[in-house]
Amino acid sequence: MKDKFIRILSPIQIFVVGLLDIAVIGYAIFAVKTLAKRQATSVIFFAACVVLAFIVAVLVTKEIVSHGVKFHDDELEFTGIDNDNIFAYEDIVKVETEKDEKASLVKNFVDRQSKIIFTLKDERVVTVYIGITTKSTLKKVSDEIISRLPQSAQNEISASSDNTQGE
């Protein structure tokens, strides 16, 4: 199969990073206009700080946009996660997903994150938190993982999902 990358972007991350990027661009325009009018030491220092803020904004935006799942021929990798982020398809026995959609004012941020739960051949269960995502993104990632699993694991997953649909 061909390598594939599915980007995992949280709507909250997009909003916050976009807002910060717009603010940095606004300060950059203000710094250039002020620098054109007068060239005092404080204005030059402010312009230098804006240049540093612009560099940081570009790096943060690049990092946020690079988060996702890389699907290779024999394994998948969750980018943006440091530990337990690479899984071989042949080691995966079962894949489950969870996404909290119930309204609540008492749940914290971690309780709202989407999860992909892998059951591996060695009977370990690994939960990967992929952040606050949309249902469609979570389904797209889950469907791609299942489509790349060996046929025996796909049959087991489809049999377990058929049993739970009637309940």
Image: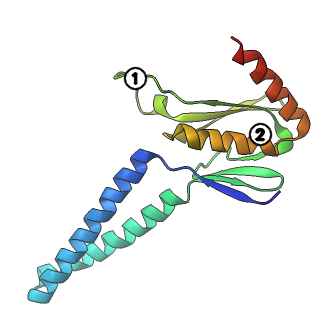
Query: Circle 1 is placed at which residue position?
Result: 103
Which label was assigned to residue 146? Answer: 2
Name the image quarter holding residue 116.
top right
- Say above or below: 26 vs 65: below
Residue drawn at x 48%, y 57% as measured from the top left: 64
Q: Image point 47% across, 46% down: which residue?
A: 10
Specify the quadrant that holds the N terminus. bottom right
Mark 2 is surrounded, within 10 Å at the Cα level, by few (under 14), some (14 to 19) or many (20 or more) other residues, namely many
Mark-to-mark CA distance, 2 and 1: 29 Å
Q: Provide the secondary structure element on which disc 2 rests.
A: helix
Percent x, y of residue 161: 75, 23
In the rendered image, the residue lying farthest to the right is 152
Left or right, residue 132 beside residue 95: left
Please, what secondary structure does the residue beneath circle 1 have?
loop
Residue at the (50%, 35%) spot, across then down: 113
* Residue 102 at x, y percent in the picture: 45, 22
Q: Are marks 2 and 1 in contact (CB under 8 Å)?
A: no
- x then y, percent, for residue 122: 84, 31
Coordinates of residue 47 in the picture (x, y in percent): 22, 79
